Amino acid sequence: MVKINYIIREENKGQLISEDAMLDALDIEEILEKNYKYILDSMKNTHYLLTVNHCTYFKEIVFSKKVVGFCAYTIINSISNLSLVACYILPEFRGKGLFFDEINRVFESENELTIYQPPRYVMGLLIKYGFAKKISENLAVTAIDINIASNSIEKIFNAEKILYEDFVYTSNIYDLDSCGFLIFPEKDSKIIYLTDVLNVDSKVYDPQKTRENITEDYADNILTTLEENKEEIDTFINNIKRNSTKNTEYDRKEEDVDFEDLKKSIQKSTQTNDLIENFEKIEYEKNSLFDKNSIDKEKYLLAYQNVSIYDFLNVFKDNRNIELTNSIINIDHEFTKDYIKNLVLKEGYITNEMEKREFQEYLNSLTVNEMKSILKNNNLTVTGNKPELIERISDYIPSNNVVDCAYHISEKGSKFIEDHEEIDFYNLYMKNFYYYEFQDYLISHDGPIDEISTKFLNEHIVRSVEKKDNKEYTDSLNALALINELNNNSDKGLYYELKKFIIGLNPIFLDKKLYNYYHPISKNNIDNIELLLFKSKLKLDEEFVKAWQDMEINNFHVPFEKALSILNKMLSGEDRDYMNDKIREEYLTQDSINHDKLDKSVQSTLDKYLNWY
């Protein structure tokens, strides 16, 4: 291969060229000829022609300190609305997420982005990275608006001429077979324009044959497909545009973490820095076996990144839709919007590329001439025998540049799921505890996961009594009850539900924020006890004695006989609100409860604290 003298950027950051932001003052081809001759030569060899030759900003794309491409932007309407008018990456550096990173940076800078009539391979990248999606065999929708000049329109359907000359239209629909964008100039009209074929597309994809076979019902078929997929298209576009806009009102002061201090305390690495920047907050409401002030923040961040990746992959496995998955997973997220989606794509856990073995098998089925054509289209040497051609294509050309493949979980993604199966158990039973502590505990103990988890939770119970933490105690009992109930161990499930009932009547500690809102009896707890008594056929009196005798607390506000009487009344249908008020008045008065000095002006929602109610 020809040796290239790349421009080197030691700081691994691309330079930005502008004429003090003067509108379209830069000549793209002139800049390339003067400073980036090797990129311009590659563009000519791959038949890439600039459709627009002037821009406001010219930005280098850098990989491993080498300048391997560029993006050119112009300004539309306002300085925050950028239009990408040209983008080129050397073929041997494609498939490394460089275009994705560039698009993402524009979104993260809170700028609006449009693209000026991109070629088909750019549409392929937008599909790959989730900014566009196929809605049929030949149609794709993009959430990024595409700008089209009126002089680029080649075919008109259901009209005799273009409605507006010297006009820039917007499109979001692309015909993959015809390599053209579809424009709908009037709302609720059947008029459709099809853009002309770009030079690079005519050389690589030969769409002219498809266009020659376009029939009179082409426009009707397009409109029918769009109507049938209208809801999916609207949801996709809205999700992308909503999730790509940062919340500018977000107040850093409300975060639970001093990120400046956190940055200093963690070893600097690109992965960890990205993690810090995209993490919303540390949940100090979770239960820990250690002092919460000594939380290992790096472990915490990496652990919850893994939990989020695992959740994303499992939801995606069910619906095969990246944007739908992203909108669902964001419901309970501890990261900034799109971070996990971007990460699973960048790390290759989800991909629209073939696995290397499958790709090589596919290449092996091609003829030598077919492989030489692929290499030629990607500006690579075409000499050598078949194994050499296969190796060269595998090493330098992404499979999705050669063959279409739907998004799927890769072997790497499947291995990640397999290596983190305990997250299913954690999500089901242990969400009120720190995942990284739970994971460490599993690694350091032998045995089935439910047995190890029982030991882990019993340690929490002991610790909660020592530090008088009512929440940790009840969270631990709740997890133990749930583990046994869902594993059809009704006897043990009943045992822990009864202990939950007893601690509800006899809280170890209520702080000033909690007392005014505390409800001793939980409806779910009573319902579970009733169901488990029916399943187990056990006698309540005998089981209540066992649970009472095994309580880890020494002081009881409600005595045994009275507690059992209250439970029987609740199982018989006594009004829960009435009984809660009566217990508070008789047994859980301010003076009888161990709490801080009560300040009635301090109010607190207990959504997190009492989430087991």
Image: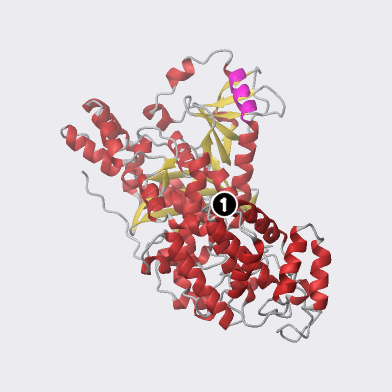
Q: Main secondary structure of the magenta part?
A: helix
Furthest-top residue in view? 216
Horizontal side of 12 relative to 575 (left or right) equals left
Question: Given the image, on which type of amino acid does mark 1 rest?
Answer: Ile
Asked if residue 221 is among those painted magenta in the image, a careful observer would answer yes
- Residue 286's place in the image compared with 350, above or below, is below
**Image location of residue 224, percent across then percent down:** 62, 22
Classify the position of the N terminus by image quarter: top left
Asked if residue 512 is among those painted magenta in the image, a careful observer would answer no
Who is closer to the viewer here, 392 or 169? Answer: 392
**Image location of residue 277, percent across then percent down:** 51, 65
Decide if residue 486 is in sight here: yes
Please give the name of the residue rendered at 59% of the width and 69% of the height, measured from the top-left corner.
546
**Image location of residue 204, percent across then percent down:** 37, 29
Classify the position of the C terminus by image quarter: bottom right
Who is closer to the viewer here, 597 or 203? Answer: 597
Q: Residues within 10 Å of mark 1 (few under 14, many from 20)?
A: many
- Residue 555's place in the image compared with 343, above or below, is below
Start-end of magenta stretch: 219-229
Please give the name of the residue rendered at 50% of the width and 78% of the height, measured from the top-left corner.
290
Who is closer to the viewer here, 521 or 56? Answer: 521
In the picture of the structure, the residue carrying the numbered disc 1 is: 329
Decide if residue 380 is in sight here: no
Who is closer to the viewer here, 284 or 199? Answer: 284
